[in-house]
Image: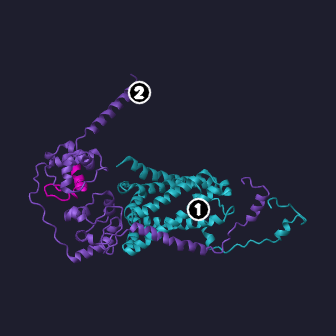
Amino acid sequence: MELSNVFLFVGLPYAALVIFLIGTIQRYRNKGFKVSSLSSQFLEGRALFWGTVPFHFGILVLFFGHLSAFLLPGPTLMWNANPTRLITLEITAFAFGLSTLVGLTALFVRRLTNVRIKMVTTKMDIFLELLLLVQVVFGLWVAVGYRWGSSWFAADLAPYLWSLFKANPDITAVGAMPWPIKVHIVGAWLLIGIFPYTRLVHFLVAPLHYITRPYQRVMWNWDRKAIRDPRTPWSAMRPKNN
Amino acid sequence: MTKHNLVHGRLLALAALTMACALSAPANAATGEENFAKICGACHSIGGGKLVGPDLAGVTTRRTEDWLLKFIKSPKAMIDAGDATAVALFKEFNLVMPDATQYNDAEIKDIVAYLATKSGVAAAATPPPPPKEASPAEIARGQNLFQGLERLKNGGPACNSCHHVKNDAVIGGGVLAKELTTVFSTMGTPGINAILGKPPFPVMAAAYAEHPLTDDESAALVGFLQDADKKHELQQPRDYGFRLVWSGAAALVPLMGLYSLIWRKRKVRPVNDKVFDRQVKGGDDVAQ
Protein backbone atom coordinates (compact mmCIF):
# COMPACT_ATOMS: atom_id res chain seq x y z
CA MET A 1 0.00 0.00 0.00
CA GLU A 2 1.57 3.25 -1.09
CA LEU A 3 2.09 5.91 1.51
CA SER A 4 0.76 8.69 -0.76
CA ASN A 5 -2.52 6.78 -1.11
CA VAL A 6 -2.80 6.44 2.67
CA PHE A 7 -2.26 10.18 3.02
CA LEU A 8 -4.69 11.19 0.27
CA PHE A 9 -7.50 8.73 1.02
CA VAL A 10 -7.25 8.24 4.78
CA GLY A 11 -5.30 11.14 6.34
CA LEU A 12 -6.74 13.92 4.19
CA PRO A 13 -10.40 12.79 4.59
CA TYR A 14 -10.18 12.59 8.38
CA ALA A 15 -8.33 15.93 8.57
CA ALA A 16 -10.92 17.50 6.26
CA LEU A 17 -13.85 16.19 8.30
CA VAL A 18 -12.33 17.41 11.58
CA ILE A 19 -11.62 20.87 10.13
CA PHE A 20 -15.14 20.95 8.66
CA LEU A 21 -16.75 20.18 11.99
CA ILE A 22 -14.62 22.28 14.32
CA GLY A 23 -14.12 25.13 11.85
CA THR A 24 -17.83 25.48 11.15
CA ILE A 25 -18.77 25.54 14.83
CA GLN A 26 -15.99 28.01 15.57
CA ARG A 27 -17.00 30.31 12.71
CA TYR A 28 -20.65 30.22 13.71
CA ARG A 29 -19.84 30.96 17.34
CA ASN A 30 -17.38 33.77 16.63
CA LYS A 31 -18.75 35.39 13.51
CA GLY A 32 -22.30 34.13 13.25
CA PHE A 33 -23.40 36.99 11.03
CA LYS A 34 -20.69 36.11 8.49
CA VAL A 35 -22.11 32.62 7.95
CA SER A 36 -23.45 33.65 4.55
CA SER A 37 -22.44 33.80 0.93
CA LEU A 38 -22.53 37.61 0.82
CA SER A 39 -25.13 38.07 -1.91
CA SER A 40 -24.13 40.25 -4.82
CA GLN A 41 -27.51 40.38 -6.52
CA PHE A 42 -27.83 43.87 -5.07
CA LEU A 43 -24.81 44.93 -7.16
CA GLU A 44 -25.46 43.14 -10.44
CA GLY A 45 -28.41 40.96 -11.47
CA ARG A 46 -28.40 40.30 -15.21
CA ALA A 47 -25.23 38.16 -15.53
CA LEU A 48 -25.86 36.68 -12.08
CA PHE A 49 -29.03 34.92 -13.25
CA TRP A 50 -27.28 32.95 -16.04
CA GLY A 51 -24.50 32.03 -13.64
CA THR A 52 -26.16 31.27 -10.38
CA VAL A 53 -29.27 29.43 -11.59
CA PRO A 54 -27.55 26.87 -13.90
CA PHE A 55 -24.78 26.48 -11.31
CA HIS A 56 -27.03 25.90 -8.32
CA PHE A 57 -29.50 23.62 -10.09
CA GLY A 58 -26.59 21.60 -11.48
CA ILE A 59 -24.58 21.35 -8.28
CA LEU A 60 -27.63 20.44 -6.16
CA VAL A 61 -28.61 17.59 -8.48
CA LEU A 62 -25.00 16.35 -8.61
CA PHE A 63 -24.51 16.69 -4.85
CA PHE A 64 -27.65 14.74 -4.00
CA GLY A 65 -26.82 12.23 -6.76
CA HIS A 66 -23.42 11.49 -5.22
CA LEU A 67 -24.96 11.46 -1.73
CA SER A 68 -27.70 8.99 -2.65
CA ALA A 69 -25.23 6.61 -4.35
CA PHE A 70 -23.19 6.74 -1.13
CA LEU A 71 -26.15 6.26 1.23
CA LEU A 72 -28.06 3.79 -0.94
CA PRO A 73 -25.57 1.84 -3.09
CA GLY A 74 -27.89 -1.19 -3.36
CA PRO A 75 -30.90 0.69 -4.76
CA THR A 76 -28.55 2.64 -7.09
CA LEU A 77 -27.26 -0.63 -8.56
CA MET A 78 -30.82 -1.88 -8.77
CA TRP A 79 -31.83 1.22 -10.74
CA ASN A 80 -28.84 0.78 -13.06
CA ALA A 81 -29.66 -2.91 -13.60
CA ASN A 82 -31.81 -1.84 -16.52
CA PRO A 83 -29.54 -0.46 -19.28
CA THR A 84 -32.14 2.11 -20.38
CA ARG A 85 -32.39 3.47 -16.86
CA LEU A 86 -28.58 3.48 -16.51
CA ILE A 87 -28.12 5.52 -19.68
CA THR A 88 -30.97 7.90 -18.77
CA LEU A 89 -29.36 8.51 -15.38
CA GLU A 90 -25.91 9.07 -16.89
CA ILE A 91 -27.16 11.51 -19.56
CA THR A 92 -29.27 13.44 -17.03
CA ALA A 93 -26.35 13.68 -14.60
CA PHE A 94 -24.03 14.74 -17.42
CA ALA A 95 -26.47 17.47 -18.54
CA PHE A 96 -26.62 18.83 -14.98
CA GLY A 97 -22.81 18.63 -14.89
CA LEU A 98 -22.66 20.78 -18.01
CA SER A 99 -25.21 23.14 -16.44
CA THR A 100 -22.89 23.47 -13.40
CA LEU A 101 -19.88 24.13 -15.63
CA VAL A 102 -21.68 26.78 -17.71
CA GLY A 103 -23.03 28.50 -14.59
CA LEU A 104 -19.75 28.39 -12.70
CA THR A 105 -17.81 29.74 -15.67
CA ALA A 106 -20.33 32.60 -16.01
CA LEU A 107 -20.03 33.37 -12.28
CA PHE A 108 -16.23 33.27 -12.43
CA VAL A 109 -16.06 35.60 -15.44
CA ARG A 110 -18.55 37.96 -13.74
CA ARG A 111 -16.47 37.94 -10.57
CA LEU A 112 -13.30 38.79 -12.47
CA THR A 113 -14.72 41.41 -14.83
CA ASN A 114 -17.47 43.29 -13.00
CA VAL A 115 -16.00 46.20 -11.04
CA ARG A 116 -18.66 46.15 -8.32
CA ILE A 117 -18.28 42.41 -7.76
CA LYS A 118 -14.49 42.75 -7.70
CA MET A 119 -14.81 45.15 -4.77
CA VAL A 120 -16.43 42.44 -2.61
CA THR A 121 -14.29 39.52 -3.83
CA THR A 122 -11.75 37.90 -1.53
CA LYS A 123 -8.76 35.76 -2.47
CA MET A 124 -10.59 32.79 -0.97
CA ASP A 125 -13.51 33.36 -3.37
CA ILE A 126 -11.14 33.11 -6.34
CA PHE A 127 -9.42 30.03 -4.91
CA LEU A 128 -12.75 28.35 -4.19
CA GLU A 129 -14.18 29.04 -7.64
CA LEU A 130 -11.00 27.73 -9.28
CA LEU A 131 -11.11 24.57 -7.14
CA LEU A 132 -14.80 24.08 -7.99
CA LEU A 133 -14.01 24.55 -11.70
CA VAL A 134 -11.26 21.91 -11.53
CA GLN A 135 -13.64 19.62 -9.66
CA VAL A 136 -16.45 20.01 -12.21
CA VAL A 137 -14.12 19.56 -15.21
CA PHE A 138 -12.66 16.38 -13.70
CA GLY A 139 -16.16 15.16 -12.82
CA LEU A 140 -17.27 15.53 -16.45
CA TRP A 141 -14.05 13.89 -17.63
CA VAL A 142 -14.61 10.92 -15.30
CA ALA A 143 -18.25 10.65 -16.44
CA VAL A 144 -17.21 10.32 -20.10
CA GLY A 145 -13.76 8.78 -19.81
CA TYR A 146 -14.50 6.19 -17.12
CA ARG A 147 -18.14 5.22 -17.72
CA TRP A 148 -20.42 4.18 -16.02
CA GLY A 149 -19.58 6.10 -12.88
CA SER A 150 -22.95 5.76 -11.16
CA SER A 151 -22.50 1.97 -11.07
CA TRP A 152 -18.88 1.69 -10.05
CA PHE A 153 -19.28 4.50 -7.52
CA ALA A 154 -21.98 2.45 -5.81
CA ALA A 155 -19.90 -0.73 -6.05
CA ASP A 156 -16.44 0.60 -5.15
CA LEU A 157 -16.47 4.12 -3.72
CA ALA A 158 -19.55 3.80 -1.51
CA PRO A 159 -17.85 0.93 0.42
CA TYR A 160 -14.68 3.10 0.66
CA LEU A 161 -16.63 6.03 2.13
CA TRP A 162 -18.51 3.73 4.49
CA SER A 163 -15.20 2.21 5.60
CA LEU A 164 -14.01 5.72 6.55
CA PHE A 165 -17.13 6.41 8.59
CA LYS A 166 -16.86 3.01 10.27
CA ALA A 167 -13.26 3.97 11.29
CA ASN A 168 -11.88 0.98 9.41
CA PRO A 169 -10.53 2.52 6.18
CA ASP A 170 -10.17 0.22 3.17
CA ILE A 171 -8.42 1.95 0.27
CA THR A 172 -7.46 -1.02 -1.91
CA ALA A 173 -10.02 -0.13 -4.60
CA VAL A 174 -9.65 3.64 -4.44
CA GLY A 175 -5.84 3.36 -4.47
CA ALA A 176 -5.99 1.41 -7.74
CA MET A 177 -8.31 3.87 -9.53
CA PRO A 178 -7.07 5.88 -12.54
CA TRP A 179 -5.58 9.28 -11.65
CA PRO A 180 -8.41 11.56 -12.88
CA ILE A 181 -10.79 9.76 -10.51
CA LYS A 182 -8.25 10.17 -7.70
CA VAL A 183 -8.00 13.92 -8.45
CA HIS A 184 -11.81 14.19 -8.28
CA ILE A 185 -11.88 12.42 -4.90
CA VAL A 186 -9.01 14.48 -3.46
CA GLY A 187 -10.72 17.65 -4.75
CA ALA A 188 -13.87 16.68 -2.87
CA TRP A 189 -11.96 16.22 0.42
CA LEU A 190 -10.20 19.57 -0.10
CA LEU A 191 -13.56 21.28 -0.59
CA ILE A 192 -14.86 19.78 2.65
CA GLY A 193 -11.64 20.85 4.40
CA ILE A 194 -11.78 24.51 3.35
CA PHE A 195 -15.57 24.67 3.70
CA PRO A 196 -15.71 26.66 6.99
CA TYR A 197 -13.42 29.37 5.63
CA THR A 198 -15.29 30.02 2.40
CA ARG A 199 -18.65 31.33 1.22
CA LEU A 200 -19.73 27.66 0.98
CA VAL A 201 -20.97 27.96 4.58
CA HIS A 202 -24.22 29.41 3.23
CA PHE A 203 -25.08 25.81 2.34
CA LEU A 204 -25.68 25.13 6.05
CA VAL A 205 -27.95 28.12 6.57
CA ALA A 206 -29.96 27.94 3.34
CA PRO A 207 -33.26 29.68 4.08
CA LEU A 208 -35.37 26.71 3.12
CA HIS A 209 -38.44 28.17 4.84
CA TYR A 210 -38.45 30.92 2.19
CA ILE A 211 -39.73 28.33 -0.29
CA THR A 212 -43.05 28.00 1.51
CA ARG A 213 -43.18 31.50 3.01
CA PRO A 214 -45.78 33.87 1.55
CA TYR A 215 -44.64 36.93 -0.38
CA GLN A 216 -43.36 39.91 1.53
CA ARG A 217 -44.62 42.99 -0.20
CA VAL A 218 -42.52 46.10 0.31
CA MET A 219 -44.65 49.25 0.29
CA TRP A 220 -43.33 52.79 -0.10
CA ASN A 221 -45.75 55.12 1.59
CA TRP A 222 -44.49 58.24 -0.07
CA ASP A 223 -43.89 59.53 -3.55
CA ARG A 224 -40.23 58.72 -4.35
CA LYS A 225 -40.04 61.32 -7.11
CA ALA A 226 -41.30 64.05 -4.82
CA ILE A 227 -38.82 63.04 -2.15
CA ARG A 228 -35.87 63.38 -4.55
CA ASP A 229 -37.06 66.76 -5.77
CA PRO A 230 -34.95 69.50 -4.11
CA ARG A 231 -38.01 71.71 -3.93
CA THR A 232 -39.80 69.32 -1.59
CA PRO A 233 -39.58 70.71 1.92
CA TRP A 234 -37.90 68.42 4.48
CA SER A 235 -39.21 67.88 7.91
CA ALA A 236 -36.48 65.47 8.99
CA MET A 237 -33.03 64.28 7.76
CA ARG A 238 -32.55 64.20 4.02
CA PRO A 239 -31.28 60.76 2.83
CA LYS A 240 -27.61 60.99 1.80
CA ASN A 241 -27.36 58.16 -0.70
CA ASN A 242 -30.13 59.28 -2.95
CA MET B 1 29.11 8.46 29.68
CA THR B 2 26.15 9.95 31.51
CA LYS B 3 23.11 7.85 32.34
CA HIS B 4 21.07 9.72 29.73
CA ASN B 5 23.61 9.00 27.00
CA LEU B 6 23.77 5.35 28.01
CA VAL B 7 20.00 4.92 27.66
CA HIS B 8 20.09 6.81 24.38
CA GLY B 9 22.89 4.59 23.07
CA ARG B 10 21.06 1.40 24.07
CA LEU B 11 17.88 2.59 22.40
CA LEU B 12 19.81 3.31 19.20
CA ALA B 13 21.40 -0.12 19.28
CA LEU B 14 18.00 -1.72 19.81
CA ALA B 15 16.54 0.23 16.89
CA ALA B 16 19.44 -0.78 14.66
CA LEU B 17 19.00 -4.43 15.65
CA THR B 18 15.26 -4.32 14.97
CA MET B 19 15.88 -2.77 11.56
CA ALA B 20 18.52 -5.35 10.71
CA CYS B 21 16.13 -8.15 11.69
CA ALA B 22 13.34 -6.61 9.62
CA LEU B 23 15.58 -6.26 6.57
CA SER B 24 16.87 -9.80 6.74
CA ALA B 25 13.54 -11.34 7.81
CA PRO B 26 13.18 -14.74 6.17
CA ALA B 27 10.47 -14.98 3.52
CA ASN B 28 7.33 -16.58 4.90
CA ALA B 29 6.03 -19.40 2.70
CA ALA B 30 2.72 -19.59 4.59
CA THR B 31 1.91 -15.94 3.85
CA GLY B 32 3.16 -16.59 0.33
CA GLU B 33 0.61 -19.39 -0.08
CA GLU B 34 -2.24 -17.08 0.95
CA ASN B 35 -1.06 -14.36 -1.41
CA PHE B 36 -0.53 -16.84 -4.24
CA ALA B 37 -4.17 -17.95 -3.94
CA LYS B 38 -5.36 -14.34 -3.80
CA ILE B 39 -3.14 -12.74 -6.44
CA CYS B 40 -1.71 -15.41 -8.77
CA GLY B 41 -4.21 -18.27 -8.54
CA ALA B 42 -6.57 -16.71 -11.07
CA CYS B 43 -4.10 -17.25 -13.91
CA HIS B 44 -1.53 -19.79 -12.69
CA SER B 45 -1.73 -23.33 -11.35
CA ILE B 46 0.96 -25.41 -9.67
CA GLY B 47 0.83 -28.77 -11.38
CA GLY B 48 -2.69 -28.22 -12.74
CA GLY B 49 -1.65 -27.27 -16.26
CA LYS B 50 -1.61 -23.99 -18.20
CA LEU B 51 -4.39 -21.54 -17.40
CA VAL B 52 -3.96 -17.97 -18.60
CA GLY B 53 -0.26 -18.15 -17.76
CA PRO B 54 2.17 -21.04 -17.43
CA ASP B 55 1.98 -23.88 -14.90
CA LEU B 56 4.35 -22.80 -12.11
CA ALA B 57 5.27 -26.29 -10.86
CA GLY B 58 9.04 -26.35 -10.38
CA VAL B 59 9.47 -22.80 -11.60
CA THR B 60 12.08 -22.09 -8.92
CA THR B 61 14.32 -24.79 -10.41
CA ARG B 62 13.96 -23.36 -13.92
CA ARG B 63 14.61 -19.69 -12.99
CA THR B 64 16.75 -17.93 -10.41
CA GLU B 65 15.12 -16.21 -7.44
CA ASP B 66 16.48 -12.87 -8.58
CA TRP B 67 14.90 -13.30 -12.02
CA LEU B 68 11.54 -14.29 -10.50
CA LEU B 69 11.52 -11.29 -8.16
CA LYS B 70 12.30 -8.90 -10.99
CA PHE B 71 9.80 -10.51 -13.35
CA ILE B 72 6.90 -10.51 -10.85
CA LYS B 73 7.62 -6.87 -9.97
CA SER B 74 7.37 -5.71 -13.59
CA PRO B 75 7.09 -8.19 -16.48
CA LYS B 76 6.67 -5.31 -18.90
CA ALA B 77 10.00 -3.78 -17.89
CA MET B 78 11.72 -7.16 -18.45
CA ILE B 79 10.17 -7.55 -21.92
CA ASP B 80 11.06 -3.96 -22.82
CA ALA B 81 14.64 -4.61 -21.65
CA GLY B 82 14.77 -7.56 -24.07
CA ASP B 83 15.19 -10.37 -21.51
CA ALA B 84 15.14 -13.53 -23.70
CA THR B 85 13.01 -15.67 -21.32
CA ALA B 86 10.48 -12.90 -20.71
CA VAL B 87 10.14 -12.24 -24.45
CA ALA B 88 9.71 -15.97 -25.16
CA LEU B 89 6.94 -16.18 -22.51
CA PHE B 90 5.22 -13.16 -24.01
CA LYS B 91 5.32 -14.77 -27.47
CA GLU B 92 3.97 -18.06 -26.13
CA PHE B 93 1.08 -16.62 -24.11
CA ASN B 94 0.48 -13.46 -26.16
CA LEU B 95 -0.27 -11.53 -22.97
CA VAL B 96 1.71 -9.37 -20.52
CA MET B 97 1.19 -10.19 -16.87
CA PRO B 98 0.16 -7.02 -14.96
CA ASP B 99 2.89 -5.25 -12.94
CA ALA B 100 2.69 -5.98 -9.21
CA THR B 101 2.88 -2.31 -8.26
CA GLN B 102 0.54 -2.61 -5.29
CA TYR B 103 2.61 -5.35 -3.64
CA ASN B 104 5.87 -4.72 -1.81
CA ASP B 105 9.13 -6.67 -2.14
CA ALA B 106 8.51 -8.69 1.05
CA GLU B 107 5.12 -9.89 -0.23
CA ILE B 108 6.65 -10.97 -3.56
CA LYS B 109 9.50 -12.73 -1.75
CA ASP B 110 6.92 -14.67 0.29
CA ILE B 111 5.25 -15.86 -2.90
CA VAL B 112 8.59 -16.99 -4.38
CA ALA B 113 9.36 -18.81 -1.09
CA TYR B 114 6.01 -20.61 -1.39
CA LEU B 115 6.78 -21.54 -5.02
CA ALA B 116 10.13 -22.96 -3.85
CA THR B 117 8.32 -25.31 -1.44
CA LYS B 118 6.45 -26.66 -4.46
CA SER B 119 9.58 -27.25 -6.56
CA GLY B 120 9.04 -31.03 -6.49
CA VAL B 121 5.54 -30.92 -8.00
CA ALA B 122 5.45 -32.13 -11.59
CA ALA B 123 3.79 -29.97 -14.22
CA ALA B 124 0.64 -31.42 -15.75
CA ALA B 125 1.56 -33.57 -18.72
CA THR B 126 -1.70 -33.35 -20.63
CA PRO B 127 -2.96 -30.03 -21.96
CA PRO B 128 -6.37 -28.91 -20.65
CA PRO B 129 -9.37 -30.09 -22.70
CA PRO B 130 -10.66 -27.71 -25.42
CA PRO B 131 -13.50 -25.40 -24.26
CA LYS B 132 -16.99 -26.79 -24.72
CA GLU B 133 -19.52 -24.75 -26.67
CA ALA B 134 -22.00 -22.82 -24.52
CA SER B 135 -25.69 -23.58 -24.99
CA PRO B 136 -27.95 -20.81 -26.45
CA ALA B 137 -29.77 -20.61 -23.12
CA GLU B 138 -26.48 -20.04 -21.28
CA ILE B 139 -25.45 -17.36 -23.79
CA ALA B 140 -28.79 -15.57 -23.42
CA ARG B 141 -28.52 -15.67 -19.63
CA GLY B 142 -24.93 -14.42 -19.85
CA GLN B 143 -26.10 -11.47 -21.98
CA ASN B 144 -28.71 -10.53 -19.38
CA LEU B 145 -26.25 -10.89 -16.50
CA PHE B 146 -23.59 -8.88 -18.33
CA GLN B 147 -25.83 -5.85 -18.80
CA GLY B 148 -27.78 -6.25 -15.57
CA LEU B 149 -31.20 -7.23 -16.98
CA GLU B 150 -30.88 -10.25 -14.71
CA ARG B 151 -29.39 -9.12 -11.42
CA LEU B 152 -26.47 -11.05 -9.95
CA LYS B 153 -27.84 -13.19 -7.13
CA ASN B 154 -25.57 -11.74 -4.44
CA GLY B 155 -26.14 -8.12 -5.48
CA GLY B 156 -22.85 -7.38 -7.27
CA PRO B 157 -22.74 -4.70 -10.01
CA ALA B 158 -23.44 -5.75 -13.61
CA CYS B 159 -20.32 -6.28 -15.75
CA ASN B 160 -21.10 -3.39 -18.12
CA SER B 161 -20.57 -0.96 -15.18
CA CYS B 162 -16.85 -1.17 -15.99
CA HIS B 163 -16.45 -3.35 -19.10
CA HIS B 164 -17.31 -2.96 -22.74
CA VAL B 165 -18.06 -5.78 -25.16
CA LYS B 166 -18.61 -5.17 -28.86
CA ASN B 167 -21.86 -7.06 -29.20
CA ASP B 168 -25.18 -5.88 -30.64
CA ALA B 169 -27.19 -7.84 -28.09
CA VAL B 170 -25.97 -5.88 -25.06
CA ILE B 171 -25.42 -2.30 -23.88
CA GLY B 172 -21.73 -2.12 -23.12
CA GLY B 173 -19.88 1.10 -22.73
CA GLY B 174 -18.04 0.64 -19.42
CA VAL B 175 -14.46 1.88 -19.72
CA LEU B 176 -13.11 1.80 -16.18
CA ALA B 177 -11.72 -1.70 -16.84
CA LYS B 178 -10.58 -3.76 -19.85
CA GLU B 179 -12.70 -4.32 -22.94
CA LEU B 180 -13.79 -7.96 -22.97
CA THR B 181 -14.67 -8.53 -26.65
CA THR B 182 -11.88 -11.03 -27.28
CA VAL B 183 -11.10 -12.00 -23.69
CA PHE B 184 -12.17 -15.59 -24.34
CA SER B 185 -9.38 -16.12 -26.91
CA THR B 186 -6.71 -14.94 -24.49
CA MET B 187 -7.97 -16.42 -21.23
CA GLY B 188 -10.29 -19.29 -22.05
CA THR B 189 -12.84 -20.81 -19.69
CA PRO B 190 -10.45 -21.55 -16.77
CA GLY B 191 -8.90 -18.08 -16.87
CA ILE B 192 -12.23 -16.20 -16.95
CA ASN B 193 -13.72 -18.50 -14.32
CA ALA B 194 -10.71 -17.97 -12.08
CA ILE B 195 -10.92 -14.17 -12.42
CA LEU B 196 -14.67 -14.16 -11.75
CA GLY B 197 -14.18 -16.38 -8.72
CA LYS B 198 -11.22 -14.55 -7.19
CA PRO B 199 -10.59 -11.24 -8.98
CA PRO B 200 -6.85 -10.42 -8.86
CA PHE B 201 -7.55 -6.73 -9.71
CA PRO B 202 -8.10 -4.57 -6.60
CA VAL B 203 -11.05 -2.54 -7.97
CA MET B 204 -12.93 -5.64 -9.11
CA ALA B 205 -12.00 -7.54 -5.94
CA ALA B 206 -13.46 -4.76 -3.77
CA ALA B 207 -16.68 -4.59 -5.80
CA TYR B 208 -17.38 -8.32 -5.47
CA ALA B 209 -15.83 -8.96 -2.04
CA GLU B 210 -19.24 -8.91 -0.33
CA HIS B 211 -21.19 -9.95 -3.43
CA PRO B 212 -19.47 -12.99 -5.00
CA LEU B 213 -20.73 -14.49 -8.27
CA THR B 214 -22.28 -17.94 -8.12
CA ASP B 215 -20.82 -20.80 -10.22
CA ASP B 216 -23.77 -20.91 -12.62
CA GLU B 217 -23.55 -17.11 -13.15
CA SER B 218 -19.84 -17.45 -13.99
CA ALA B 219 -20.60 -20.28 -16.41
CA ALA B 220 -23.29 -18.22 -18.17
CA LEU B 221 -20.95 -15.21 -18.43
CA VAL B 222 -18.16 -17.37 -19.83
CA GLY B 223 -20.67 -18.71 -22.38
CA PHE B 224 -21.67 -15.20 -23.42
CA LEU B 225 -18.04 -14.02 -23.67
CA GLN B 226 -17.17 -17.08 -25.77
CA ASP B 227 -20.07 -16.31 -28.11
CA ALA B 228 -19.20 -12.58 -28.23
CA ASP B 229 -15.59 -13.41 -29.07
CA LYS B 230 -16.63 -15.79 -31.86
CA LYS B 231 -18.83 -13.29 -33.69
CA HIS B 232 -17.29 -9.96 -32.75
CA GLU B 233 -16.26 -9.11 -36.30
CA LEU B 234 -19.90 -9.07 -37.38
CA GLN B 235 -21.00 -6.59 -34.68
CA GLN B 236 -21.44 -2.83 -34.98
CA PRO B 237 -18.98 -0.71 -33.00
CA ARG B 238 -20.70 1.89 -30.80
CA ASP B 239 -19.08 5.00 -29.34
CA TYR B 240 -20.85 5.53 -26.02
CA GLY B 241 -18.58 8.39 -24.91
CA PHE B 242 -19.34 10.52 -27.96
CA ARG B 243 -23.07 9.81 -27.59
CA LEU B 244 -23.01 10.68 -23.90
CA VAL B 245 -21.38 14.07 -24.56
CA TRP B 246 -23.82 15.00 -27.33
CA SER B 247 -26.90 13.77 -25.52
CA GLY B 248 -25.84 15.70 -22.42
CA ALA B 249 -25.25 18.87 -24.45
CA ALA B 250 -28.63 18.42 -26.17
CA ALA B 251 -30.36 17.98 -22.81
CA LEU B 252 -28.74 21.19 -21.56
CA VAL B 253 -30.72 23.30 -24.07
CA PRO B 254 -34.21 22.50 -22.68
CA LEU B 255 -32.72 22.74 -19.18
CA MET B 256 -31.65 26.34 -19.82
CA GLY B 257 -35.10 27.00 -21.30
CA LEU B 258 -36.65 25.61 -18.15
CA TYR B 259 -34.60 27.94 -15.93
CA SER B 260 -35.67 30.87 -18.06
CA LEU B 261 -39.31 29.76 -17.88
CA ILE B 262 -39.31 29.32 -14.10
CA TRP B 263 -37.90 32.82 -13.60
CA ARG B 264 -39.71 34.51 -16.50
CA LYS B 265 -41.00 37.19 -14.13
CA ARG B 266 -37.59 37.95 -12.64
CA LYS B 267 -36.37 41.51 -12.24
CA VAL B 268 -33.64 41.80 -14.82
CA ARG B 269 -32.00 44.77 -13.11
CA PRO B 270 -31.33 45.13 -9.41
CA VAL B 271 -33.79 47.30 -7.50
CA ASN B 272 -31.15 49.90 -6.85
CA ASP B 273 -29.80 50.04 -10.37
CA LYS B 274 -30.96 53.62 -10.91
CA VAL B 275 -29.36 54.66 -7.63
CA PHE B 276 -26.04 53.14 -8.78
CA ASP B 277 -26.28 54.82 -12.17
CA ARG B 278 -26.82 58.20 -10.56
CA GLN B 279 -23.83 57.65 -8.28
CA VAL B 280 -21.58 56.66 -11.18
CA LYS B 281 -22.65 59.77 -13.07
CA GLY B 282 -22.04 61.88 -10.02
CA GLY B 283 -18.51 60.44 -9.58
CA ASP B 284 -19.28 58.63 -6.32
CA ASP B 285 -18.24 55.18 -7.52
CA VAL B 286 -14.61 54.89 -6.53
CA ALA B 287 -13.78 52.05 -8.87
CA GLN B 288 -15.12 53.51 -12.10
Say which mark, if any, is on residue B191.
none
> Is residue B33 found inside the magenta-colored segment of the image?
yes
Q: Name the residue under label 2.
A: B4
> Is residue B230 found inside the magenta-colored segment of the image?
no
Q: Residue B16 lies in what quarter of the image?
A: top left
Protein chain holding label 2: B
- Looking at the picture, tell me which residue is in the foreground, A152 or A35: A152
Q: Where is residue B244 in the image (x, y as percent from the top left)?
A: 43, 68
Q: Position of residue A123 (x, y in %)?
A: 60, 50
Asked if badge 1 and badge 2 are on a common chain, one would say no
Q: Amino acid type of disc 1? A: Ala
The residue carrying pointer 2 sits among few (fewer than 14), some (14 to 19) or many (20 or more) residues within 10 Å by Cα, namely few
Q: Amino acid type of disc 2? A: His
Name the colour assigned to chain A in the rendering.
cyan
What residue is at 49 percent from the left and 60 percent from the top?
Answer: A136
Q: Name the residue under label 1.
A: A106
Residue B69 sits above or below residue A232 on the image: above
What residue is at 76 percent from the left and 65 percent from the top?
Answer: B274
What residue is at 9 percent from the left and 60 percent from the top?
Answer: B126
**Magenta residues?**
B31-54
The residue carrying pointer 1 sits among few (fewer than 14), some (14 to 19) or many (20 or more) residues within 10 Å by Cα, namely some
Q: Can residue B152 be seen in this view?
A: no
